[in-house]
Amino acid sequence: MIKPANRETIEEAAGLIREGRLVAFPTETVYGLGADATSGRAVAAVFAAKDRPEFNPLIVHVATAADAERLVRFDDRARRLAAAFWPGALTLVLPRTTACPVSLLAGAGLDTLAVRVPDQPTAQALLRAAGCPIAAPSANRSGEVSPTAAHHVARSLGDAVALILDDGPTRIGVESTVLDLSGRGSAILRHGGVTEEEMAAVIGPLGEAADDGAPKSPGMLSRHYATRIPLRMMATDVRPGEALLAFGPRPLGGACITANLSEAGDLGEAARNLFAMMRELDRPDCAGIAVMPVPDEGLGRAINDRLRRAAHG
């Protein structure tokens, strides 16, 4: 059931969270599928609703950095990044505290946890009203295109969600950046709403995580964000029957349908439009989706990461 986000519906959603039910809510990145992170039963319901592999950990959302420090052990790097980017689209992977109340299932049994403080009024109000950390992956079936509007959630998850809080389209449109600080080094596990350059300006050069082994955060599976029809990156032409996901002022011709991420070549606008336009072009009457090149810099890295995983296999 979709309801507009207001004080009354947020209180209703908070009550459902405390009861162990699932609630979809907006963040600045994408819509999340929320559950009480301290309840193994509620977290298991998230995995069931998404048909998500249980080795793929969830991001735990909290209202403040102080709340996060009750769950994970911060070092100086984490404190500097939290001061610079929280609330915001940055997730930090850090060692769990000894008394961390979050269900082990939420972290896929690892001794680390992915945490973030969202920068969105409805998300903040829900976290404060619920009074518990909320585990919230994207509110869609596992591997599908992430939702940036309430109706995307309803279409993907249906009755698996007790309530969907509608606060309009999300502001950023791609998921949070995930940075692993659980060891002595730092490694980007997923590019997202905070860029590599912005983080490096705070803590120095960053590394890249190897994309193998047990994932430490969401969004690391090779096949992810998938459309039902084939998606082809770096397109310089349009093949017969293909739709076109364009970028910039000169879209290719010959497509059965075209959506332009940003005619102005603005990466922020492109990120906001990405998932909605992927859904728009994912039509059974098209043979596939041709994607024009997007600069691999700043938010473009996050956009290309999502497109590569959608095209994998």
Image (cartoon, rainbow, N blue to C red):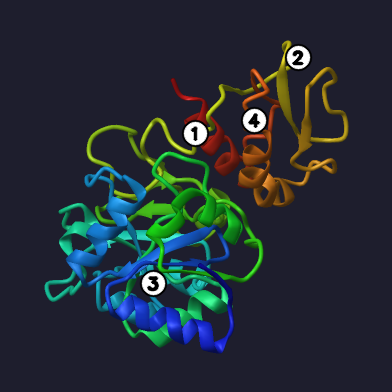
As drawn, which residue projects farthest toward the left? 98
Between circles 3 and 4, the one closer to the viewer is 4
Q: Secondary structure at mark 2?
A: loop
Name the residue: 55% across, 72% down: 119
Q: Which mark is residue 242?
A: none
**Amino acid at dot 2:** Asp
Q: Earlier in the sequence, mark 3 or mark 1?
A: 3
Name the residue: 33% across, 50% down: 217
Q: Secondary structure at mark 3?
A: helix
Q: Position of residue 252 (x, y in %)?
A: 82, 22
Snapshot quadrant of residue 58: bottom left
Q: Are marks 2 and 1 in contact (CB under 8 Å)?
A: no
**Marks 3/1: CA–CA distance:** 35 Å
Q: Earlier in the sequence, mark 3 or mark 2?
A: 3
Between circles 1 and 4, the one closer to the viewer is 4
Name the residue: 79% across, 41% down: 265
Between circles 3 and 2, the one closer to the viewer is 2
**Circle 4 sits on which residue?**
283
Q: Secondary structure at mark 4?
A: loop
Between circles 4 and 2, the one closer to the viewer is 4
Q: Earlier in the sequence, mark 2 or mark 1?
A: 1
**Circle 3 sits on which residue?**
79
**Marks 2/1: CA–CA distance:** 22 Å
**Circle 2 sits on which residue?**
237
**Circle 1 sits on which residue?**
226
Q: Secondary structure at mark 1?
A: loop
**Amino acid at dot 1:** Ala
**Marks 3/2: CA–CA distance:** 47 Å
Tell me if residue 11 comes above or below residue 228 in the rendering: below
